[in-house]
Amino acid sequence: TGYDSDCGVFSPDGRIFQIDYAIKASESQGLGIAMKVKDGVCMMVQRSYHSPLQEPSSSRFFQLTDTILVCVVGMLPDGRVICQNLLEHCQTYQDNYAREIPIDQLATVASNLMQQYTHYSSVRPFGCSLFITNGDELYFLQPSGDFFNSFAASAGKKSGNARVELEKLIGEQQTAGTDRFGHLKKSRNDGGNLNKIELDYSLAEASKVMWTVFDENQDMKWYCEGAVIKNGQIEIKSFEEMKQIVDQNKE
């Protein structure tokens, strides 16, 4: 119909098809899960074996500062371009202000960059989603440039199913009751049961979500990368450590 020829054209129902295609591209490279738990943040991303000749390599984690880590879910080359831009921005901010860039400001910079690539016919949207965290806050960014401060997030293949499992893990949102006039107070999600999970066990919980979503008999063989951030300390797990965690939590 011509509405999907470039990013500058809206369809009659107000959609930009190139963004929809970019989201589909981000769902073709495995599932990513991030959770903000009691004492930090964990991130886990699934990788597929495309060949028996392949070894686990090319990490999807990018450390931008001493305390800020980015996880790319989707097309890794696209994610490298974004992370290189963010790294330069972090270095410039450090040089100008002699302190680390606030993570909400960095998330805004990443969002603006991704959104700019949805405007022009000469470019295409990035085919990846991002998790950005410093251990205290977790931001989830989509190819459209939308970003959210989240308690937990999923992106990539079967992310919808994983989101349902994460919502179950959080538990029901508690009501805030009524005020002295009998009016219902606004309820605010505080992370629910995630606040009870120790960081040391968070990757195990993420592994359980992975096994719930994927069928080893039907889906391609996969392995995982994982990282945890606590008190400004970033620890990227080795492939061997992640294999042990994933295998131990197979249900």
Image: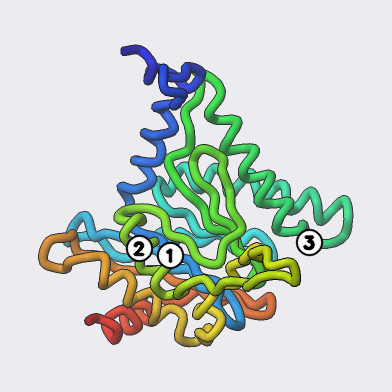
Per the model, the C-alpha gap separating discs 2 and 3 is 33 Å
Residue at the image position 84 percent from the left and 53 percent from the top: 95
User: What residue is shown with label 3?
Assistant: 100
Q: Earlier in the sequence, mark 2 or mark 1?
A: 1
Q: Earlier in the sequence, mark 2 or mark 3?
A: 3
Residue at the image position 54 percent from the left and 20 percent from the top: 120
Does the CB distance between marks 2 and 3 fall below 8 Å? no
**Seen in the image, is 46 located left or right of residue 197?**
left
Per the model, the C-alpha gap separating discs 2 and 1 is 8 Å
- Based on the displayed image, in which of its 4 quarters is residue 185 positioned? bottom right
- Tell me residue 114's x, y (percent): 57, 38
Task: Check the picture and name the quadrant holding the N terminus.
Answer: top left
Residue at the image position 18 percent from the left and 59 percent from the top: 220
Q: Amino acid at mark 2?
A: Ala
Q: Earlier in the sequence, mark 3 or mark 1?
A: 1
User: What residue is shown with label 2?
Assistant: 162
Task: Check the picture and name the quadrant holding the C terminus.
Answer: bottom left
Q: Amino acid at mark 3?
A: Glu
Does the CB distance between marks 2 and 1 fall below 8 Å? yes
**Seen in the image, is 77 located left or right of residue 174?**
left
Q: Is residue 143 above or below residue 36?
A: above
- Tell me residue 116's x, y (percent): 60, 30
Q: Residue furthest left?
A: 217
Q: Is residue 158 above or below residue 236?
A: above
User: What residue is shown with label 1?
Assistant: 33
